[in-house]
């Protein structure tokens, strides 16, 4: 695992050598990092591996972010590459690098093959992830049958109860009771059946689960692929439950109440891992209420996470902390800490005892909600910027999508499309339909900055603005080519902009979006 002393010394040396300007030094939990981390979303080729090596060897980039389902050819490939890179460099380098992974997504093998466009045989040979095999054709074209040879291989790709029942999904706090049990049937559920009851399918080709057993299985598999223990584990898009609830027509308040119960149980599982010193801390990666768009690309309201409620769940999870596998079976001891918009002294004291370190959320010139705020979204939400909450509670924010965004009306780019862009570094210049206006606003807003800032490429300026938005933020950059690593390293040598300058630029971009009809479409309000 990473070492607080080793990460601190790495950044001290980087600053002394001029590799990192002092304004780019950040804290993530007890570790020290630079303000730009390596986002390993779609890495998999030898070119990507070379870029990863360049970042790790730079002595300036030391936060590596991935997820259990990231990869070009198969889920988990990204973790395997990070593991191989760190293993080759020995324990000293591992202590200098902060590894963050995420859990929650479930990928069905046959659909992965279709998504990634690879041969089924190649997928089956390379799969070292969920211990499943591909679905082979049987009979006519397009027909498939399962090639599963033992029961355990189906555990992570189970059909959710939502496909076979109109009953609300059962609460994890009740031990995963099924609709049949609620109607009077008896009998205990096995762990597999609990996961079947609580898996959700919010989108076609997208499955999600927060069950303790599932999270622990994913964590163990992640450790195996990484060949080390990750320092932090984030829950990946827990709001997918809300997307599923929306599809089923469940009332907002009922869906939110159920989600936060599930989140509390999941946090208790992660707290147990922290108590056993298997991880240093945990967090949540998602689209919060201040984000303009949901994880499904719709206007964000029903499907959004409330950051204050998430922090409250972390406090309430402390009462459940114990053995990780028994976390779901504990009594509901929630004290309602999630209700207040701002923690009182007692809640603050309790929160300091949790392992919650921060969030991951989007921030870019067309999605500046976590910096600017987003009022009047739902009743009871005052629109406070999530970064303000993060700063007030001394947490961190891992910023994703710094160079890619939802386009203005008429050119909507969905989350599914980001994965198929050539690279995030090229997105701003090649993919954005507003590229000229975008560049013009950057020139206007950065006129008063020094010539070094003005000489940066547009994507480098976007990185700098994101890194300058908060002293508590680390920007995740998809550096899939060595040249993008070098561009990021150039940004780290340039002083951060003032928060005032970064906020002004985001506000001007928001104004432009409104002028182009973002308010009418409901995307920027």
Image (spheres, helix red, strand yellow):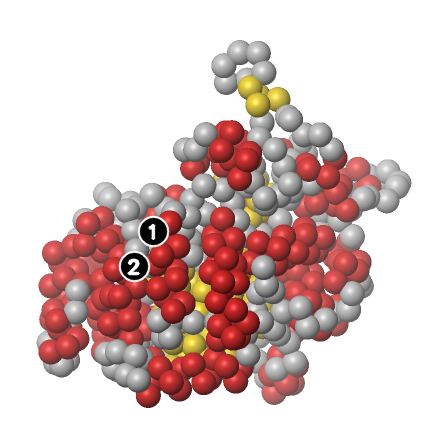
- Earlier sequence position, callout 2 versus callout 1: 1
Residue 225 picture quarter: bottom right
Mark sitting on residue 47: 1
Q: Which residue is mark 2?
A: 482
One can see residue 391 in this view = no
User: Which element carries disc 1, helix, strand or loop?
Assistant: helix
Q: CA distance from mark 2 to mark 1?
A: 8 Å
Q: In the rendering, at what x and y percent does residue 448 appear?
A: 12, 80
Mark sitting on residue 114: none
Is residue 402 left or right of 266 when viewed as pictured?
Answer: left
Considering depth in this image, is 101 or 388 the residue closer to the camera?
A: 101
Q: Residues within 10 Å of mark 2 (few under 14, many from 20)?
A: some
**Labels 2 & 1 near each other (Cβ < 8 A):** yes
Which residue is outermost to the right? 186
Q: Residues within 10 Å of mark 1 (few under 14, many from 20)?
A: few
User: Does 265 sit above or below residue 444?
Assistant: above
User: Does 46 sit above or below residue 109?
Assistant: below
Is residue 128 left or right of 385 when viewed as pictured?
Answer: right
Considering depth in this image, is 167 or 417 the residue closer to the camera?
A: 417
Q: In the rendering, at what x and y percent does residue 424 appear?
A: 30, 54
Residue 178 picture quarter: top right
Q: In the rendering, at what x and y percent does residue 399 appear?
A: 39, 66
Which residue is outermost to the top? 140
């Amino acid at each position: 695992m990473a070492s607080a002393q080793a990460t601190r010394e790495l950044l001290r040396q980087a600053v002394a050598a001029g590799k990192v300007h002092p304004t780019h030094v950040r804290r993530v939990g007890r570790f020290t990092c630079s303000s730009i981390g390596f986002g390993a979303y779609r890495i998999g080729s030898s070119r990507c591996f070379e870029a990863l090596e360049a970042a790790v060897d730079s002595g300036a980039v030391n936060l590596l972010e991935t997820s259990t389902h990231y990869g070009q050819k198969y889920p988990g490939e990204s973790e395997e590459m990070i593991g191989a890179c760190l293993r080759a460099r020995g324990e000293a380098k591992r202590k200098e690098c902060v590894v963050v992974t995420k859990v929650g997504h479930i990928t069905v093998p046959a659909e992965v093959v279709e998504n990634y466009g690879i041969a089924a045989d190649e997928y089956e040979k390379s799969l070292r992830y969920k211990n499943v095999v591909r679905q082979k054709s049987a009979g006519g074209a397009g027909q498939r049958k399962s090639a599963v040879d033992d029961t355990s291989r189906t555990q992570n790709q189970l059909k959710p109860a939502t496909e076979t029942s109109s009953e609300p999904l059962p609460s994890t706090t009740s031990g995963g009771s099924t609709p049949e049990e609620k109607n009077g049937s008896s009998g205990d559920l096995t762990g597999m059946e609990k996961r079947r009851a609580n898996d959700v399918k919010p989108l076609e080709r997208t499955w999600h689960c927060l069950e303790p057993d599932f999270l622990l299985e994913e964590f163990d598999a992640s450790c195996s692929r990484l060949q080390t223990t990750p320092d932090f584990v984030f829950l990946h898009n827990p709001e997918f439950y809300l997307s599923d609830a929306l599809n089923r027509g469940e009332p907002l308040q009922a869906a939110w109440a159920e989600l936060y119960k599930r989140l509390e149980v999941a946090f208790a599982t992660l707290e147990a891992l922290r108590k056993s010193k298997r991880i240093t801390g945990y967090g949540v990666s998602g689209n919060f209420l201040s984000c303009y768009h949901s994880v499904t690309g719709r206007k964000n309201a029903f499907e959004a996470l409330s950051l204050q409620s998430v922090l409250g769940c972390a406090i309430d999870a402390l009462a459940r902390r114990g053995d990780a596998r028994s976390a779901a079976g504990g009594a509901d001891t929630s004290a309602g800490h999630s209700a207040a918009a701002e923690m009182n002294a007692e809640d603050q004291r309790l929160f300091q005892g949790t392992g919650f370190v921060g969030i991951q959320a989007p921030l870019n010139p067309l999605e500046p909600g976590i910096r600017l705020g987003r009022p009047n979204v739902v009743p009871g939400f005052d629109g406070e910027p999530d970064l303000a909450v993060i700063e007030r509670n001394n947490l961190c924010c891992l910023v994703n999508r710094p160079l890619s965004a939802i386009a203005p009306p008429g050119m909507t780019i969905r989350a599914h499309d980001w994965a198929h862009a050539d690279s995030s570094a090229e997105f701003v210049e090649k993919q954005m339909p507003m590229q000229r206006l975008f560049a013009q606003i950057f020139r206007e807003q950065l006129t008063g900055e020094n010539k070094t800032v003005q000489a940066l490429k547009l994507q480098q300026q976007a990185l700098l603005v994101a890194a300058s938005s908060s002293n508590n933020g680390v920007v995740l950059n998809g550096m899939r080519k060595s040249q993008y690593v070098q561009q990021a390293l150039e940004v780290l040598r340039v002083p951060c902009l003032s928060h005032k300058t970064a906020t002004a630029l985001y506000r001007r971009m928001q104004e432009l979006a409104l002028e182009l009809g973002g308010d009418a479409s409901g995307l920027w309000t």
